[in-house]
Image: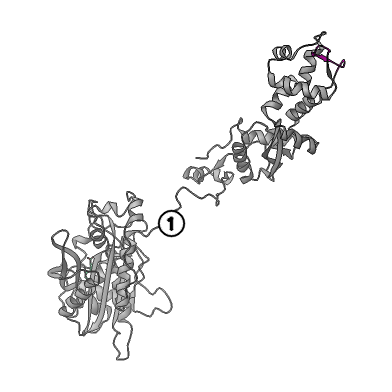
C-alpha cells in the first residue's frame, strides 16, 4: 500500500507554508522555538524530495546572564539607588537605602556608580540624596535591546558587559531555507513498495516512489556470511577440481522425462515417475523432442531417441529390454528434475559423440552440485528440494573395485574413512552400491551416497563403444552439512525458518586446501 507521508500540522509542512510566503527564509526568524534536531529532520525530508534546499548557518547570539535579566526588568543598580533617593526629599542613610531596595549588593555597587555619574551626593549629616532631577538609564536600555534582538552593534561594549557578567555569547546553528525544484505546499504521498495491487489497478503509473536512501548506514553493519551449505559446497568443488573434474552446467531445473528418466533406462511404469514422487510441470506440459541447441551441436538426437525407445520396448545391445509399449509423449512430459543425473545423461550423450585420437570418446570426469526436487512430504530430514553432489567418470578398464577405491579417496578427502558398501538397485547402474560411513557422533553407520556403474542400455544407446565404462555417484549436500554443523532438523538449514545468526556464526570451512 502507498503510505501517506504528510500530516498538515507537521513541521515539514509548516516549512513549506513559510517558504510559500517568502523564500529564502531564516530558521531563526521563521521557527525561533523549534528544536534544531526536529527542524533538521524536517528539512532533510524536504531536501531528499527536492522540495526545499538549505544551508547551515552558524552565528553567535548575545544572551543575558541572570544579573543582566534583572537589570532589564528593574533597572541598573545605580538607577535604582537614584530612583529611591529621588523620592526621599531629606535623604537616606545606607541602612535606609538597603531596607528600601532590599539588596545590599545593589546598594553597594549602585551608590558608587551613581556618585561617579554625579546623580547623587551626600548631605552634611552623611545621608545620600539625589543630585539631579532625572537620569537616563543607558545600561537598562542596552540590556533590553540585547534581550529583544540578541545582538548589539558595539563590540567593545559587549566585551565589557561580558566581563561584568551581564551577558554571554552563545553559538547558534540555524538554516537558510530555499524553495526546491519540486516545491509544493504538500508532501506528495510516496509509495515505498511496488505492490501487486498497484500493478493490477495501474496506479503505479502515476505513483510517486520514495527514493532510496543510499546514505543510510542501516541497523546492522556486520558484513555478510556464507551459508553453511555454500561452505560445504565450496569444499566439495575444491575436491572435484583437484581430482581433475570438469563442472557440468546445471542451470535448468526443468527437464523432460526423456533426460530425467528414459535416457537412464527408468521404465515408464517405474514408481519414481509417479506423481507422488515427481513434480510434473503443468504449463507448459510437454517438451520439444531432444534436438541440437546450437549449430556446433552435431549429435544425432534422432538416432538416440530411436535407441532409447528400442532398448526399453524391445531390447537392444544384448539386453532383452522391459518389453512394454514405450510412449514418446510420456517421455516428453516436463518435470522438475529429480536428480542431477539428468544432466549427467546429457553430458555423457555429448561425450559419446566425441572422437579422441584412438577414434573412441575420450576419458572424462564431470561433476555438479545443484538443486533437485522430489515430491516428498517434508519432515525433519526431508525437504521437497535439496542439493545433489554428483560425479561421473568415463574411461576404459573401469572396474567395480576401482569405483570403491575412488570412493575411498574421494570421501577420505572430506574426512570420511572406513567406508562400507551395500548392494543396491538403480535402473541405470549395475552393479549399484550404497555407500556408508561410520559416524563417530551418532555411533552408527550412516548412508552417505549412492553409486554404480552405468548399464550398457544407457551407454550404448548414447553411442559409447562396449569397452567404455562409466562410474556414477550421488549424494545430498545437506547430509554432510548437517553432520558437520550438528543440525538435526533440515529446516534449520534451508528455508524461511533459518536463523540468520546461525549462518553468521557457523564456523568457517577450510577452503584453502593445498
Ligand atoms: N541419481 C542417484 C540419486 O539420485 C545418484 C547416482 C548417480 C547413482 C549416478 C548412480 C550413478 O541418488
Would residue 356 be found to the left or right of residue 69 on screen?
left
Q: Which residue corresponds to mark 1? A: 223
In the displayed structure, 166 sits above or below 121; it is below
Asked if the stretch drawn in magenta spans residue 491, the answer is no
| Picture quadrant of residue 429 | bottom left
Q: Residue at x 84, y 17 (%)?
A: 121
Q: Position of residue 198 (x, y in %)?
A: 51, 43
In the displayed structure, 61 sits above or below 372; it is above
Residue 209 showing in the rendered view: yes
What is the image's colouring? one colour
Q: Position of residue 128 (x, y in %)?
A: 80, 15
Q: Secondary structure at mark 1?
A: loop
Q: Nearer the viewer, residue 65 or 426?
A: 65
Magenta residues span: 122-134
| Picture quadrant of residue 76 | top right
Asked if the stretch drawn in magenta spans residue 129, the answer is yes
Which quarter of the rendered image does ligand 1 occupy? bottom left
Q: Position of residue 259 (x, y in %)?
A: 29, 69
Q: Residue at x 15, y 66 (%)?
A: 436
Q: Quadrant of the C terminus?
A: bottom left
Would residue 392 be found to the left or right of residue 28 on screen?
left
User: What is the total number of numbered labels drawn onto the structure image?
Assistant: 1
Q: Position of residue 85 (x, y in %)?
A: 79, 13
Residue 176 showing in the rendered view: no
Would residue 40 be found to the left or right of residue 451 on screen?
right
Q: Nearer the viewer, residue 481 or 271?
A: 481
| Picture quadrant of residue 261 | bottom left
Amino acid at each position: 500500500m502507498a503510505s501517506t507521508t504528510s500530516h498538515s500540522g507537521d513541521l515539514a509542512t509548516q516549512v513549506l507554508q513559510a517558504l510559500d510566503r517568502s523564500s529564502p527564509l531564516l530558521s531563526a526568524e521563521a521557527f525561533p522555538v523549534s528544536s534544531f534536531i526536529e527542524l533538521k529532520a524536517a528539512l532533510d525530508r524536504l531536501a531528499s524530495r527536492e522540495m526545499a534546499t538549505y544551508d547551515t548557518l552558524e552565528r553567535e547570539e548575545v544572551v543575558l546572564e541572570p544579573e543582566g535579566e534583572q537589570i532589564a526588568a528593574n533597572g541598573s543598580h545605580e538607577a535604582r539607588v537614584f530612583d529611591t533617593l529621588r523620592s526621599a526629599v531629606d535623604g537616606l542613610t545606607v541602612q535606609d537605602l538597603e531596607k528600601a531596595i532590599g539588596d545590599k549588593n545593589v546598594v553597594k555597587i549602585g551608590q558608587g556608580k551613581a556618585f561617579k555619574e554625579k546623580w547623587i551626593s551626600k548631605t552634611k549629616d552623611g545621608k545620600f540624596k539625589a543630585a539631579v532631577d532625572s537620569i537616563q538609564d543607558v545600561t537598562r536600555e542596552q540590556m533590553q535591546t540585547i534581550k529583544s534582538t540578541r545582538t548589539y552593534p558595539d563590540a567593545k561594549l559587549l566585551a565589557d558587559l561580558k566581563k561584568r557578567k551581564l551577558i554571554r555569547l552563545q553559538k547558534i546553528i540555524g538554516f537558510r531555507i530555499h524553495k526546491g525544484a519540486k516545491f509544493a505546499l504538500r508532501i506528495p504521498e510516496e509509495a515505498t513498495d511496488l505492490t501487486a495491487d498497484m500493478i493490477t489497478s495501474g496506479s503505479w503509473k502515476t505513483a510517486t516512489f520514495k527514493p532510496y536512501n543510499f546514505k543510510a548506514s542501516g541497523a546492522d553493519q556486520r558484513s555478510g556470511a556464507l551459508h553453511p551449505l555454500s561452505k560445504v559446497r565450496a569444499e566439495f568443488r575444491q575436491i572435484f577440481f583437484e581430482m581433475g573434474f570438469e563442472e557440468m552446467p546445471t542451470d535448468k531445473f526443468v527437464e523432460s522425462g526423456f533426460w530425467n528418466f528414459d535416457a537412464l533406462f527408468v521404465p515408464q511404469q517405474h514408481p519414481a515417475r509417479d506423481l507422488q514422487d515427481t513434480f510434473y510441470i503443468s504449463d507448459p506440459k510437454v517438451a520439444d523432442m531432444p534436438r541440437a541447441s546450437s549449430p556446433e551441436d552435431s549429435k544425432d538426437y534422432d538416432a538416440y531417441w530411436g535407441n532409447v525407445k528400442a532398448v526399453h520396448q524391445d531390447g537392444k545391445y544384448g539386453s532383452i529390454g522391459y518389453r512394454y509399449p514405450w510412449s514418446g509423449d510420456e517421455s516428453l512430459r516436463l518435470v522438475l528434475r529429480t536428480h542431477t543425473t539428468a544432466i549427467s545423461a546429457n553430458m555423457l550423450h555429448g561425450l559419446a559423440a566425441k572422437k579422441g585420437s584412438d577414434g573412441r570418446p575420450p576419458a572424462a570426469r564431470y561433476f555438479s552440485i545443484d538443486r533437485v526436487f522430489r515430491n516428498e512430504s517434508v519432515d525433519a530430514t526431508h525437504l521437497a528440494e535439496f542439493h545433489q553432489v554428483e560425479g561421473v567418470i568415463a574411461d576404459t578398464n573401469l572396474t567395480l573395485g576401482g569405483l570403491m577405491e575412488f570412493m575411498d579417496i574421494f570421501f577420505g578427502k572430506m574426512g570420511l574413512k572406513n567406508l562400507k558398501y551395500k548392494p543396491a538397485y538403480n535402473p541405470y547402474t549395475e552393479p549399484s552400491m550404497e555407500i556408508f560411513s561410520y559416524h563417530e557422533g551418532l555411533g552408527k553407520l550412516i548412508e552417505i551416497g549412492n553409486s554404480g556403474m552405468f548399464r550398457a542400455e544407457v551407454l550404448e544407446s548414447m553411442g559409447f563403444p562396449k569397452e567404455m565404462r562409466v562410474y556414477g555417484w550421488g549424494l545430498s549436500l545437506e547430509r554432510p552439512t548437517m553432520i558437520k554443523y550438528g543440525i538435526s532438523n533440515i529446516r534449520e538449514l534451508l528455508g524461511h525458518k533459518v536463523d540468520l545468526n546461525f549462518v553468521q556464526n557457523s564456523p568457517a570451512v577450510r577452503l584453502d586446501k593445498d
